[in-house]
């Protein structure tokens, strides 16, 4: 009986080592060699300190910063350990209430005209690192006022950070919130009180 099972056990051990250990190590090595920044999480380092990742959204609530999409990840949002959307469907009254409250908050800040969807709805992960160019430009006046600079200069900086569609066809144009906020700090440091 053992002579019948032995080939299966040897085969199973071989494929376990091959596919469970060797293959992941090779792919990880290739990833680190070919794409070291991406393989290590696309971390952004400023002044020798990691300030975030280009791929993971974080909350910027101060008026001088570009604000990200709302987040449903965790109790307070932007919790990478609890990444998830709200799972509220389009006909759910709770979603309608959240959208109305977020839109009212933007209107209270002086926003007029059409409000982009990404300004009032959370993403599927709750950690989107990007916003639409429309939402970014919607925030230009608030950012300019907080930084005490001309709104046209802020709009120009925001426009310069618009990334096009991936490979020219995938996704939508976008603005990376972290990278844009770092550029805002470099170009227009927030005024000291």
Image: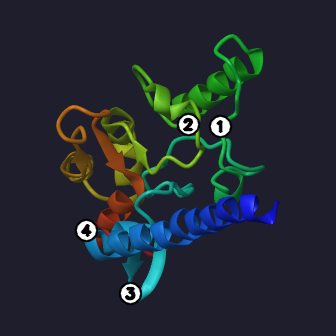
User: Where is 117 relative to 35, above or below?
Assistant: above
Displayed quadrant of residue 115:
top left
Q: Residue at x 46, y 66 (%)?
A: 23
Q: Which residue is mark 1?
A: 85
Mark sitting on residue 123: 2
Q: Residues within 10 Å of mark 1 (few under 14, many from 20)?
A: some
Residue 112 visible from this viewpoint: yes
Position in image of residue 108 (x %, y %) = 56, 32
Mark 3 or 2: in front is: 2
Quick one: label 1 or label 3, which is nearer the N terminus?
3
User: Where is 92 relative to 73, above or below?
Assistant: above
Quick one: label 2 or label 1, which is nearer the N terminus?
1
In the image, is 88 to the left or to the right of 163? right
Q: Residue at x 18, y 51 (%)?
A: 160
Nearer to us in this view, 72 or 5 = 5
Q: Secondary structure at mark 2?
A: loop
- The quarter of the image holding the N terminus is bottom right
Nearer to us in this view, 2 or 154 = 2
Quick one: label 3 or label 4, which is nearer the N terminus?
3
Mark sitting on residue 187: 4
Position in image of residue 163 (x %, y %) = 24, 46
Q: Secondary structure at mark 1?
A: loop
Question: In 3D space, how far apart are the residues under numbered discs 3 and 4 (Cα atoms)?
Answer: 16 Å
Quick one: label 4 or label 1, which is nearer the N terminus?
1
């Amino acid at each position: 009986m053992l002579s019948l099972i032995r080939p299966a056990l040897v085969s199973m051990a071989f494929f376990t080592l091959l596919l469970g250990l060797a293959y992941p190590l090779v792919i990880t090595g290739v990833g680190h060699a070919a794409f070291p920044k991406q393989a290590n999480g696309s971390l952004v380092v400023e002044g020798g300190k990691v300030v975030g990742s280009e791929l993971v959204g974080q909350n910027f609530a101060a008026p001088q910063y570009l604000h990200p999409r709302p987040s449903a990840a965790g109790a307070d949002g932007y919790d990478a350990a609890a990444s998830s959307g709200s799972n509220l469907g389009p006909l759910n009254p709770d979603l309608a209430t959240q959208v109305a409250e977020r839109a009212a908050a933007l209107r209270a800040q002086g926003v007029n005209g059409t409000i982009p969807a990404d300004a009032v709805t959370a993403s599927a992960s709750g950690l989107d690192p990007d916003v639409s160019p429309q939402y970014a430009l919607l925030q230009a006046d608030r950012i300019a006022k907080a930084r005490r600079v001309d709104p046209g200069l802020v709009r120009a900086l925001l426009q310069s950070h618009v990334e096009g569609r991936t490979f020219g066809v995938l996704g939508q144009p976008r603005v990376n919130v972290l990278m844009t906020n770092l550029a805002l700090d470099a170009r227009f440091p927030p005024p000291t009180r």
